[in-house]
């Protein structure tokens, strides 16, 4: 899709995304099974997790001894007690260089705290234990008014990432596609210049992608699918 001209990239990317989503059914079913084992009760679709977020993992489920949940929660609580911090260390540096290293050290720690990386890390650790994979997207966000940037860390569910199975067979794919379902209102507030395009976008809450839903909660939300691709 990245070889197409600018006027056709969007259509090409959507076609590739649809194909990958169709081929990714087995992996999604495995995640549904993993979530059911942890929750100790049947989960019909990953769409339930998308709608209710961490509440799914915090649900008490059936009043039975669940070794999977017990061990997962125990190791998560134990490991995530600490907040690991990278350190900048000089080797035989001058006092000025040592002072710069200390300032850089404080800057790194401050960014980890401000971005919420530690708090998010605890959730990611548990998701890694439950699903076998956890993902965080790290990016910079620029303030258009004062032209300053901040580091952001965003939680990404493993089933939101798509890779061509042939392209990624050796673990180094040329492209990664991130599929996310976002409130139309939220998108318009963040990208007001694209309001006309966003209003015309088809409502899509991921129901067909993440499995069937027996309830109708999804109709309470005006959701559109956002595809973010990296080459």
Image (spheres, rainbow, N blue to C red):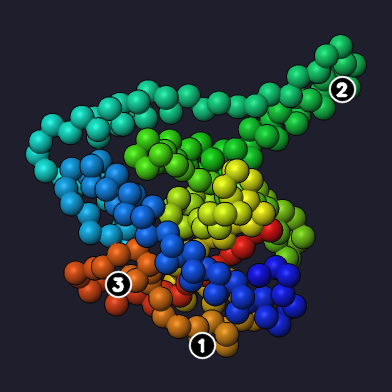
The reply to whether dot 2 and dot 3 touch (C-beta < 8 Å) is no
For the residue pair 88 and 8, the one nearer the viewer reads as: 8
Residue 166 place in picture, x, y as percent = 57, 54
Residue drawn at (73%, 70%), measured in percent from left and top?
A: 3
Indicate left or right for 101 with 221 as reference.
right
Examine the rendered structure and indicate whether residue 17 appears above or below residue 67.
below
Looking at marks 3 and 1 on the same chain, the residue that comes earlier in the sequence is marked by: 1
Looking at marks 2 and 3 on the same chain, the residue that comes earlier in the sequence is marked by: 2
Badge 2 element: helix
Q: Mark 1: few, some, or many residues within 10 Å (few <14, many ≥20)?
A: few
Indicate left or right for 222 with 101 as reference.
left
Badge 1 element: helix
For the residue pair 92 and 10, the one nearer the viewer reads as: 10
Look at mark 1 in the image and give the residue it sits on: 200
Where is the C terminus found, in terms of image quarters? bottom right
Look at mark 3 in the image and give the residue it sits on: 218
| Residue 23 placement: quadrant | bottom left
Q: CA distance from mark 2 to mark 3?
A: 56 Å
Residue drawn at (37%, 42%), measured in percent from left and top?
A: 131
Can residue 51 be spotted in the picture? no
Examine the rendered structure and indicate whether residue 66 appears above or below residue 41.
above
Q: CA distance from mark 2 to mark 1?
A: 55 Å
Q: Mark 3: few, some, or many residues within 10 Å (few <14, many ≥20)?
A: some
Examine the rendered structure and indicate whether residue 138 appears above or below residue 216.
above
Badge 3 element: helix
Look at mark 2 in the image and give the residue it sits on: 97
Q: Mark 2: few, some, or many residues within 10 Å (few <14, many ≥20)?
A: some
Indicate left or right for 172 with 207 as reference.
right
Where is the N terminus found, in terms of image quarters? bottom right
Q: CA distance from mark 3 to mark 1?
A: 19 Å
Looking at marks 2 and 1 on the same chain, the residue that comes earlier in the sequence is marked by: 2
Of badges 2 and 1, the one in the foreground is 1
């Amino acid at each position: 899709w990245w070889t197409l001209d600018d006027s056709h990239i969007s259509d090409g990317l959507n076609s590739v995304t649809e194909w990958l989503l169709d081929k990714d059914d087995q992996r999604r079913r495995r995640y549904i099974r993993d979530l059911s084992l942890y929750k100790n009760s049947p989960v019909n679709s990953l769409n339930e997790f998308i709608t209710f977020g961490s509440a799914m993992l915090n649900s008490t489920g059936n009043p039975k001894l669940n070794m999977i949940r017990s061990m997962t929660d125990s190791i998560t609580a134990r490991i995530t007690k600490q907040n690991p911090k990278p350190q900048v260390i000089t080797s035989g540096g001058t006092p000025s260089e040592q002072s710069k290293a200390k300032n850089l050290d404080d800057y790194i720690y401050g960014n980890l705290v401000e971005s919420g990386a530690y708090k998010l890390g605890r959730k990611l650790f548990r998701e890694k234990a439950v699903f076998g994979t956890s993902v965080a997207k790290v990016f910079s966000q620029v303030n258009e008014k004062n032209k300053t940037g901040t580091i952001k860390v965003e939680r990404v569910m493993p089933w939101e990432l798509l890779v061509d199975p042939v392209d990624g067979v050796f673990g180094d794919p040329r492209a990664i596609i991130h599929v996310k379902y976002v409130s139309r209102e939220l998108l318009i507030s963040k990208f007001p210049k694209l309001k006309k395009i966003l209003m015309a976008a088809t409502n899509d809450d991921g129901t067909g992608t993440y499995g069937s839903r027996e309830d109708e909660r999804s109709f309470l939300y005006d959701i559109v699918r956002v595809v973010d691709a990296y080459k």
